[in-house]
Amino acid sequence: MKLPIYLDYSATTPVDPRVAEKMIPYLTEHFGNPASRSHAFGWKAEEAVEEARAHVAALVNCDPKEIVWTSGATESINLALKGAAEFYKTKGKHLITMTVEHKATLDTMRELERRGFEVTYLNPRDDGLLDPAQLEAAIRPDTILVSIMYVNNEIGTIQDIPAIGELCRAKGVLFHVDSAQATGKCPIDLASLKVDLMSFSAHKTYGPKGVGALYVRRKPRVRLEAQIHGGGHERGFRSGTLATHQIVGMGEAYRIAKLEMATENERIRALRDKLLAGVRRIEEVFVNGDLERRVPHNLNVSFNFVEGESLIMAVKDIAVSSGSACTSASLEPSYVLRALGRSDELAHSSIRFTLGRFTTEEEIDYAVEHIRVKVAKLREMSPLWEMYKEGVDLNSVQWAAH
Amino acid sequence: MAYSDKVIDHYENPRNVGSFDKSDEGVGTGMVGAPACGDVMKLQIRVGKDGLIEDARFKTYGCGSAIASSSLVTEWVKGKTLEEAATIKNTQIAEELALPPVKIHCSILAEDAIKAAIADYRKRHGDAEPGKKAVNE
């Protein structure tokens, strides 16, 4: 077993060796520009790009013509939100999203606010899920778009996208879904979902970084104002020479995901449940977010009375991430956990474990023991743990906030 | 977060972790910070009959640099008089540990913890030093 153990698959995944192998010839041998119509080099590259497009479309059950290549989910989200807002601004100036969205959505919404749009940010319930009644109440006559993430990147909760889609369609509002964390984890059927725009990433699903896609529905047709100009590639939605090798990688990664996701997810779920059972044997451990409506590879827990950054430093044999303030530049604890109504203390004490294709049972066993020892060591050092053990109610203490 | 070797050393081999009995006559206890802010430091000093700090203990809930800052000051206060210990400045702590700017508040907290422990000791000893008001009250 190699140390450190990678348990941060929601940050990024390794490229599957089968994917890397498929990509390499498109760097050296078949290097043509897919837009070159006049020779075999171009035709070969174009053929590969279209095959990859078909694989991506197949995973989410849509028409390949509805897939637009981008540089990643962040660009897809920017194109979807800014593109739709700019195109439909005569219809209305109001958009709706959630406070627990990824920064790619939140920061794009902030930019739209600067451009004169109005945005409503809905809070989730304590389990991390959107209350549909709250969304319905927030939709106004001038609402043009709702954007909700399929799977939350921090807590792994799965939103009820089919229900939200029905609601948006009934109200005549466009619906964008950020699926960066969902591909290969949740079955996605765009033929039945009432979703108009959907953003995808390759590198969260064992493909390369630097490539993603945006699904743009054709029936009923969704229009966008292009954000990048220069040649009119991708039916005018997104100009720029296509990165053939990256696109081939994304296609192959999505092809493998479609084939293997059912068995892979069950294997990962069993490992995640083993990890959960292991950390639950430690006192004062709290799971963040709903456990049932959650992707199988995510576990987000708070170890009370231990600060997250110091825990991450202590568990150096495993690579995980924290919702602690100290791991961010802003010194604010996770805005996602705060939105769930978690106290600052528990938000500071949270660790996100995300498992994946190459996680083994041996690694999970090692991780559980490693965490148990390190949490005990840090608690020995924690004045809060000492007070808790003495029966002091920490909420009754007058702290000097600083 | 890229930490200096000194922070890593104090974090991995913290000096003087533990607690003294708060009610012990020679002990002064300072607790600063708040759980909601992500760091709480408890620093205790034991003062000998000669007026020198003969031992110190800490417990800290916080990030690596908060733990390192409190570990360091337990070493620094030993053998000092209360007046000398009270002159320890956060800038000295930050410099010794080469703390990044975003972590300077950890050294400020450590300075506050020393002052709070000294103030507690003085308060419990009444007018051990008449005319001198306890700091940080």
Image (cartoon, coloured by chain):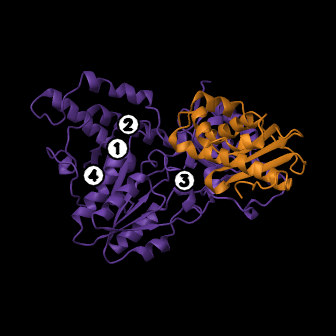
Q: Quadrant of the C terminus of chain A?
A: bottom right
For discs 2 and 4, the disc positioned in front in the rendered view: 2
Which residue in the rendered view is the most extreme toward the front? B131
Left or right: B108 with respect to B117? left
Labels 2 and 3 positioned on one and the same chain: yes
Chain of the residue under label 1: A
Label 2 sits on what residue type? Lys
Labels 2 and 4 positioned on one and the same chain: yes
Chain shaded orange = B
Q: Identify the residue under disc 2.
A: A209
Q: How far is disc 1 from disc 3 in space, using C-alphas?
A: 24 Å
Label 3 sits on what residue type? Ser
Q: Residues within 10 Å of mark 1 (few under 14, many from 20)?
A: many
Q: Residues within 10 Å of mark 2 (few under 14, many from 20)?
A: some
Labels 2 and 1 positioned on one and the same chain: yes
Q: Give the residue at x 40% y 57%.
A: A106
User: A8 or A187, which is in the foreground?
Assistant: A8
Q: Identify the residue under disc 1.
A: A72
Chain shaded purple = A
Label 4 sits on what residue type? Glu
- The earlier-in-sequence mark between 4 and 1 is 4
User: A29 or A61, which is in the foreground?
Assistant: A29
Q: How far is disc 2 from disc 4 in space, using C-alphas?
A: 22 Å
Instruction: Residue B37: give x, y in percent of width and height.
Output: 61, 54
For discs 2 and 3, the disc positioned in front in the rendered view: 3
| SS class, disc 2 | loop
Q: Quadrant of residue A53?
A: top left
Label 1 sits on what residue type? Gly
In contact (CB < 8 Å): disc 2 and disc 1: yes
**Would you say residue A220 is visible in this rendering?**
no
